[in-house]
Image (cartoon, rainbow, N blue to C red):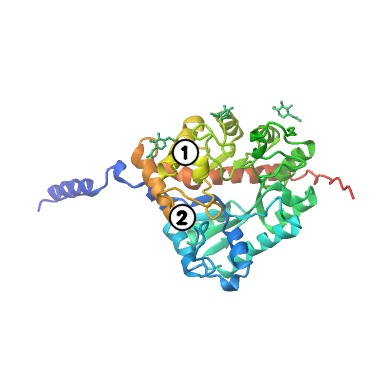
Amino acid sequence: MNNLIFLILCIFLYGGIQAKPDEIPGRTALDNFPLIDGHNDLPLNLLKLYHNKLEKYNFHEDWKSNPLAANCGHCHTDFPKLKQGKLGAQFWSAYINCQHSKNQVAETIDQIDVIKRLVHKYRDDLHFSTRSDDILTAFQQKKIASFIGVEGGNSIDNRLSVLRAYYDLGVRYLTLTHSCNLDWADSSIIDNDAYSPKKNLTDFGKAVVLEMNRLGMLVDLSHVSKNVMIEAIGVSRAPIIFSHSSSRFVYNHTRNVDDDVLKLLKENGGIIMVNFFPSFVGDNGSISDVADHINHIVDVTGADHIGIGADFDGIPTTPTGLKDVSEYPNLFDLLRKQNPERWTIENLEKLAGRNFVKVFKKVEDVKLELINESPREDVINN
Ligand SMILES: *[C@@H]1O[C@H](CO)[C@@H](O)[C@H](O)[C@H]1NC(C)=O
Ligand SMILES: *[C@@H]1O[C@H](CO)[C@@H](O)[C@H](O)[C@H]1NC(C)=O
Ligand SMILES: *[C@@H]1O[C@H](CO)[C@@H](O)[C@H](O)[C@H]1NC(C)=O
């Protein structure tokens, strides 16, 4: 055959077998860049179901196959499902109950410790992580980057010394409150309560935020009241995060974030990682409701301030189409199918993890800028 005709034939055939852009499934993004989830409560289930005894627990098994967890309605995570779900990095939550805990600091350290022991036991699959660079390192090694987040400022027991000790243990975010109003910050529960006076974020609360900036710890505003969101964004010298919150315009729940706060978030350079809990995303509780939240937030902030913080293992029900950690890729496929112009593979990579890495790097840069600042003095009242 004439070489030229052969070449033309090859080009023609190659063009024919290449997928059209809108036929490339959204989940392709998760092969290019690690999917980062801002919040998973597996450690709470390790406490509730196994009393933190990892010898009784097998991360490699379907969680249902262990009799201790067989009827668990709030279990959504095991290693095979994480692999199927293409998860690249996870903030594991060190959570304790803010009302019923007897020794908040010790119990928080128990949860930090069980995360570290889990990561150590499964070190061939999990990569203990404290820096933004760890996310890509783990991805290259086909491991899941595993970070620790403490969910609730009650865990610091009004002490900056404890906050600093958590940083040294590897904690990289603190959610300012869970669902208790603290001495120094109001929880979102106050936004449904016409009677309790609002203190917002007190001077000590502002010192907590500034100390976190100095340490290089991410400030998490999921669960706080609207006034605390606004005041914390106002005082923070680094971008903030919402580790697991959705849009209040799409579904009016006080755990979600209003559009005016989303505009402040955009100016601040931070990120909102969307929660999947049907009680927050909408009554139908389907994957398309979650997509509606993501699309609305992108309408308000653009595509650079959005991520995923599903809240698996911390929620009693999950949306259809996103029933457990194996189903994240469905969401990426759906977004792209609905709107391939908006959801280019590049924008899906931003949603998956690029936006979060950018925020984390900026927080690390601010730490370096503040390197000559002294630790803030505690006010010791005893
Ligand atoms: C809390 O924030 C609201 C809204 O900005 C403000 O009106 C109120 O005075 C604040 N309360 C305190 C105690 O600072
Ligand atoms: C949510 O509901 C509250 C109370 O009914 C109302 O004041 C507020 O404007 C609503 N917010 C949105 C975004 O619809
Ligand atoms: C979901 O709920 C909304 C109202 O909240 C309703 O308009 C819509 O038809 C429902 N969709 C499905 C698929 O059930």
Whether the residue carrying mark 1 lies under 8 Å from ligand 3 is answered with no
Q: Is residue 25 left or right of residue 164?
A: left
Q: Earlier in the sequence, mark 1 or mark 2?
A: 1
Q: Return the residue at label 1.
A: 294
Please state the horizontal and vertical placement of residue 324, each as a whole percent of the image. 46, 55
The amino acid at mark 1 is Ile
The residue under the point 65% across, 54% down is 95
Question: Disc 1 and disc 2: Cα gap in Å?
Answer: 18 Å
Please state the horizontal and vertical placement of residue 345, each as a whole percent of the image. 39, 43
**In the displayed image of the protein, which residue is found farthest to the right?**
382
The amino acid at mark 2 is Asp
**Neighbourhood count class around disc 1 (C-alpha, 10 Å): few under 14, some 14–19, many 20 upward:** many
> Which quarter of the picture shows residue 343?
top left
Q: Nearer the viewer, residue 142 or 38?
A: 38
**In the displayed image of the protein, which residue is found farthest to the front?**
195
Ligand 2 positioned in quadrant: top right
Q: Nearer the viewer, mark 1 or mark 2?
A: 2
Task: State the mark number for residue 175.
Answer: none
> Is disc 2 placed on a helix, strand or loop?
loop
The residue under the point 47% across, 31% down is 299
Q: Return the residue at label 2.
A: 324
**In the displayed image of the protein, which residue is found farthest to the left?**
1
Q: Is residue 224 left or right of residue 61?
A: right
> Is disc 1 placed on a helix, strand or loop?
helix
The residue under the point 27% across, 46% down is 19
Q: Nearer the viewer, residue 366 or 196?
A: 196
